[in-house]
Image (cartoon, helix red, strand yellow):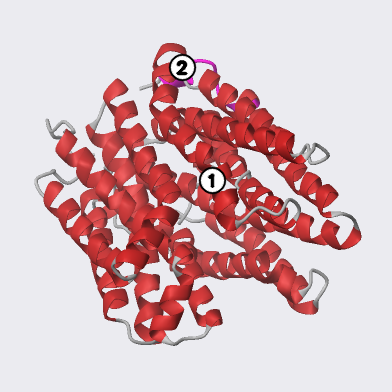
Amino acid sequence: MMETTYKGTNKLLTGIVFGVITFWLFAQAMVNIVPAVQSDLGVSLGTINVAVSLTALFSGMFIVVAGGLADRIGRKKITNIGLILSIVGSLMLVLANGSVLLILGRILQGLSAAAIMPATIALVKEYYEGAERQRALSYWSIGSWGGSGLTSFFGGLVATSMGWRWIFIFSIIVALLALWLIKDVPESKAKTTGSFKFDFGGLGIFIITMLALNVLITQGAGFGWTSPITIGLAVVTVIGIISFIKYESKRENALIDFKLFKTKPYTGATISNFLLNAVAGTLIVANTYVQVGRGFSAFQSGMLSLGYLVAVLGMIRVGEKIMQRTGAKKPMVWGTTITLIGVGMMALTFLPDLMYTIIVFVGFILFGLGLGMYATPSTDTAVSFAPDDKVGEASGVYKMASSLGNAFGIAISSTVFSTITVLSTVDIAATAGIITNVIFAVLALISIVVLVPQDSGEKR
């Protein structure tokens, strides 16, 4: 850490939130504008689907690397690099007239998110203290949760009224504003000794493992879960994970320092973050079920989950205030419990139409209330208990847990739902798919109760 008297301002915080939404609001909008992009560029649906998933894949693969680099070469520098990558990536999408610029632009957007997310969290830890830090982390969470919640509505609105390229023109403007807002902030790095050698071997093993895991999760159902390709990918993933852990444990400058997980509160926050993000599978199962099993339109099913978005955003600051009074453990436990109850209610598929519709609507609200209450205390616990010279890396691992949890949850829930639909009724399949998510929430609750200490919100 470099010595400075600089204290974080609202200007810096606005710049950070703008940086965060370049991914969560703008880059993520691609998921919802597939038909418009496809008809405009004349590329195949397969190509578009690859382009959609590339951003999250590259973000997930490089977020830990970028977090570690931020600690070493400067958190502001990596944030700036991330914003520039976002501008270039968005510009490629604006100028795209076929698949090449589309694919390259999406890869750059993924690398941009990998740089911005851990580096901005590290800047928050460096330049904000106590309650101010918790407030800053709340706004960071509002940028990510709010962005991801509004992206479908925003992307659809802009694509319909102005054309899909305007989404990425707005993204360029927001990234330029973020660069301007953080330009006067002093650099922040970790105190280091000796020369820095980058762990290329660890990165190579990590990328191969992540690619195998990602293809396994996203394409396993298509290949068939017992097909040679799927089994091969599973073997590569398992061998990759074991090799990575063994290789990294012997390295001086490891890509991921497993000593981070010796800190119980950090481990509890990261594991519960992974598992609660896995509960996102509920959204896929519940939305599909009400359309297939209950005859809802896509718009009606979207309206059912509107309470979820409002509740998440409304509760983020409330979770922060509860933490300031009670420490982080209580709102993390309460939030996870409320999520568990909300998701559990949606499994009651034997109820008649009107009653089930009301139950699902209330369930989504509770789901959102719980996640919103959990968000800031969990992030604050992870950041507060990370060593000062590893904040970027620790934030990268914590955010990677979100992305992997989300991908796992959606893949596992969809697989349970589609497999049981073939064997039984759609009602029983939906119940099984949703109970899978209840199990994730129960495991998240256990990890918090066991690992996060009672006074975790008070360590500074």
Q: Mark 2: which secondary structure?
A: loop
**Residue drawn at (78%, 73%), measured in percent from left and top?**
224
Range of residues picked out in magenta = 450-458
**SS assignment at label 1:** helix
Q: Is residue 37 left or right of residue 430?
A: left
x 44%, y 82%: residue: 39
Q: CA distance from mark 2 to mark 1?
A: 35 Å
The answer to which of 108 and 458 lies nearer the viewer is: 108
- Mark 1 lies on residue: 303
Where does residue 309 sit, x and y in percent of width and height? 47, 40
Q: Which of the two discs, 2 and 1, labels the residue nearer the N terminus? A: 1
**The N terminus appears in which quarter of the rendering?**
top left
Residue 7, picture quadrant: top left
Residue 346 in sight: no
Q: Amino acid at mark 2?
A: Gly
Assess whether residue 451 is covered by the magenta stretch. yes
Identify which residue is drawn at 45% across, 36% down: 310
Q: Which residue is mark 2?
A: 327
